[in-house]
Amino acid sequence: MKVTSHEKVDVLAMANHSINEKNADQQQKHQLKNEDATVSAYMSQCFISVSVADSVLSVKSNLIDQLEGEQIPTYLYVIDDEGYLNGILPVKVLLTVADDLFVSDIMRQSYFSVSPEQSRHDIYSLINHSGMDSVPVIHFGKLVGVLRPQDIAELIEDENTLDAHLQGATLPLNEPYLSTSPITLWRKRVGWLLLLFVAEAYTSAVLKAFEDQLEAAISLAFFIPLLIGTGGNSGTQITSTLVRAMALGEVSLRNLWAVLRKEVSTSFLVSVTISFAALIRAWILGVGIEVTIVVSLTIIAITVWSAIVSSIIPMVLKRFSIDPAVVSAPFIATFIDGTGLIIYFEIAKLVMTELA
Amino acid sequence: MKVTSHEKVDVLAMANHSINEKNADQQQKHQLKNEDATVSAYMSQCFISVSVADSVLSVKSNLIDQLEGEQIPTYLYVIDDEGYLNGILPVKVLLTVADDLFVSDIMRQSYFSVSPEQSRHDIYSLINHSGMDSVPVIHFGKLVGVLRPQDIAELIEDENTLDAHLQGATLPLNEPYLSTSPITLWRKRVGWLLLLFVAEAYTSAVLKAFEDQLEAAISLAFFIPLLIGTGGNSGTQITSTLVRAMALGEVSLRNLWAVLRKEVSTSFLVSVTISFAALIRAWILGVGIEVTIVVSLTIIAITVWSAIVSSIIPMVLKRFSIDPAVVSAPFIATFIDGTGLIIYFEIAKLVMTELA
């Protein structure tokens, strides 16, 4: 970004000023905007209201004085004495029509509106990509606020931040990262981590159940991290793509069958490629033909299994109104680790005659 | 979102129309907006230009006719015959001043501008949270386009989508998910997955190197997925928080020391908690006091090690101008898996006298 040479100092001062204002503003609002934030945490009281009985001339002549900042709003809001919204008035129309008309002659009575109690998550899917400029917030017919373009931008940004944190299996922070204490970070993280630990603890039981097979062919153990890691990674690729596509409104539950077909085909192509790499890897380690075959077959089975799980879970969660963003990489990895080990040892028992 | 009862059909038709327009628009632009997209892929030609010699009266009277859509721009752009930008003209000022003035009297000569070749990633950090409404795009002094509020919103959204895909260790899609073929998905995914597989293949070598220890105490194998999984998960929590904080401009390389101190303290608190759970888990499995101690100590060591790695890597990548969002959960998991196993078996050799 460049600043032209004229009045450089002024511009920087100006910029700093506006950044400080913005920070102060954010600080003030930050307490409210946790993961359950509703429209009321984002709406602004900075809107211009007029009455049906006002004349175009009087609205026009007062307009400039009422503007805060340099932006010119797209709409004025027509409310009555008790605060009920009667309609909206496009400023462009106001500037075009004759001065002797009244607001009631030119106001628009059809418009989108939202309620202050609607969740950020709902509004995100509705407003994002709609191209809407500003949206009135209405509570039992009364205008209680307006989502301005910058409020909408902030809401979308916060929802993206929430999703980013959920995808990392941690709770979102309510304050900037650098001012968050280790104790707070511990509280935000330890819940999910303990939950994942307890779920993953199941893998020890699985391995203990296959202790005899492990003792008979210790080289099977060499491939445990590689096999379950690959299963988790390929599942993560699918969920991160799907979760984002669902956030952008491109995919919903009615596409389940199409998604499943697409992901199973893709994962088969992927697994055959990786299986070839696994064959080479096992051959280099010199673990014998049987273990090599088991490892290659397991890669295919785990990758396809991982694709099925990773396609279905986010969509099913969405069905039960749970934010699919909670299906994070750690979530999928934990699920695949336990089930993948069972697949591995069952294939080993089938292929290796000494284990049967 | 509610639609008031009046003229319901019209509103919906209107909404559909605008959505179709938007889709057509997106389709057209989509080819350009891959991960290397620059400002030129987002800027618009929809701006109103005036000349320094124009009178306020003539600009005012032509303004309304030149508006596309209902939004009123915050600025007009003052350009000369050869297309050089001379200044910007706030519409609010235009509407306030006397008709007999000229553009040259009221235009502003200090403003922020960007270049069409700047990358989306750079612009994202600069513009996001700046509260800027629209930004002129200038190439060697000439005005070549404008980033309108909706263009800025689209740029920010695309950067968020890219980050979401990178965090899943997959390449971003250039078209909507449902219209992407399995072959394309395969191409987007297989590169990262193969790379991770090859990196993870190292774990087999590590385990083979500790084959004697494994044979002597097979129960050590039971905890492999649990230990490396927990290390990966706690690292993922850190990188997802850090990567987002860096994208929002809250954290940069000069905070490295503060981040490291914060994360090492936090991970110590976290690891002690999880270590207690590990102690209970190993005790339930009945693997003996020595393995139980090894598992509990390893959880602490791996979690703190994972915190160090996860704090440093994203910041170092940023230093080398690599988008830190590539440090995904699979990336961290792969790194921790191999090194975590070494930590595990070295601790085992220290604690368990029969392995020494």
Image: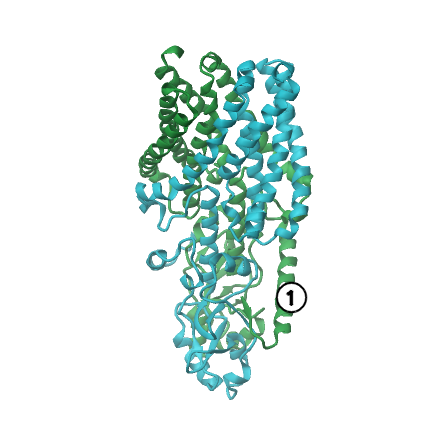
Chain colours: A cyan, B green
The answer to whether residue B56 is above or below residue B44 is below
Q: Which residue is depicted at the point 38% across and 47% down?
A: B250
Q: Residue at x 50, y 65 (%)?
A: B78
Closest to the observer: A83 or A22?
A: A83
Quarter of the image holding residue A228? top right
Viewer-nearest residue: A185 or B131? A185
Element assignment for label 1 = helix
Up/down of B2 relative to B118, above or below = below
Any part of residue A157 in sight: yes
Q: Is residue B148 visible?
A: no
Q: Examine the rendered structure and indicate whether residue B205 appears above or below residue A327.
A: above
Residue receiving disc 1: B17
Instruction: Locate residue A59, reporting x and y percent.
Output: 45, 82
Quadrant including the C terminus of chain B: top left
- Chain bearing mark 1: B
Is B235 or A61 nearer to us in this picture?
B235
- In depth, the one of A48 and A13 nearer the eye is A48
Q: Quadrant of residue A44?
A: bottom left
Q: Where does residue B1 sit, x and y in percent of width and height?
A: 53, 66
Label 1 Cα neighbours within 10 Å, binned few <14 / some 14-19 / many ≥20 = few
Going 41% across and 44% down the picture, which residue do you hit? B246
The answer to whether A42 appears left or right of B49 in the picture is left
Residue A214, percent from left and from top? 54, 18
Q: Position of residue A198 (x, y in %)?
A: 44, 35
Type of the residue with mark 1: His
